Image (cartoon, rainbow, N blue to C red):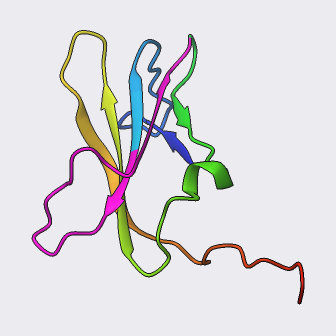
Amino acid sequence: MPVTLEDGTGAPYLTPGYLFRLEIAPLRSDGSWPTPPSFASEITAGSGEAGACFILDETDTAAFDYRLSYQWRVLAQAPGASPATLVGGPAEVQDGPLWPTEGI
């Protein structure tokens, strides 16, 4: 999932040293964010970068329950500043646990 920042003209906004954090958590009816989230990953942007790209694999998502609804958000923290939420939204787990195939 790429997250790119742009300035008012649409040009990339360089973010060297920014900390980006992806969080995924079960959806709550009251809209609050659970702490700690079910999943979290942090990336520090390098020189010349204008954002971050998060890659999740099946070991990252194996603990999610396909019967629940989840939400996600990306936070950004500029060097010396407080973290702020950039984007977020609903997330759905689309498959269940692996079924054993031996003996079938």
Q: In this image, 79 relative to 32: left or right?
A: right
Query: Which residue is drawn at the image coordinates 47% and 21% (left, top)?
Result: 14
Q: Between residues 84 and 98, which one lies in front from this camera angle?
A: 98
Looking at the rendering, in which quadrant would you find the C terminus?
bottom right
Q: Residue furthest front?
A: 103
Q: In this view, does 86 lie above or below 104?
A: above
Q: Between residues 54 and 10, which one lies in front from this camera angle?
A: 54
Query: Which residue is drawn at the image coordinates 63% and 44% (left, top)?
Result: 55
Q: Does the magenta stretch include residue 35?
A: yes
Q: Between residues 39 and 9, which one lies in front from this camera angle?
A: 39
Coordinates of residue 53 in the picture (x, y in percent): 58, 38
Coordinates of residue 93 in the picture (x, y in percent): 52, 72
Query: Which residue is drawn at the image coordinates 39% and 23% (left, top)?
Result: 19
Query: Which residue is drawn at the image coordinates 30% and 11% (left, top)?
Result: 79
Q: In this image, 4 relative to 101: left or right?
A: left
The magenta span reads 23-46
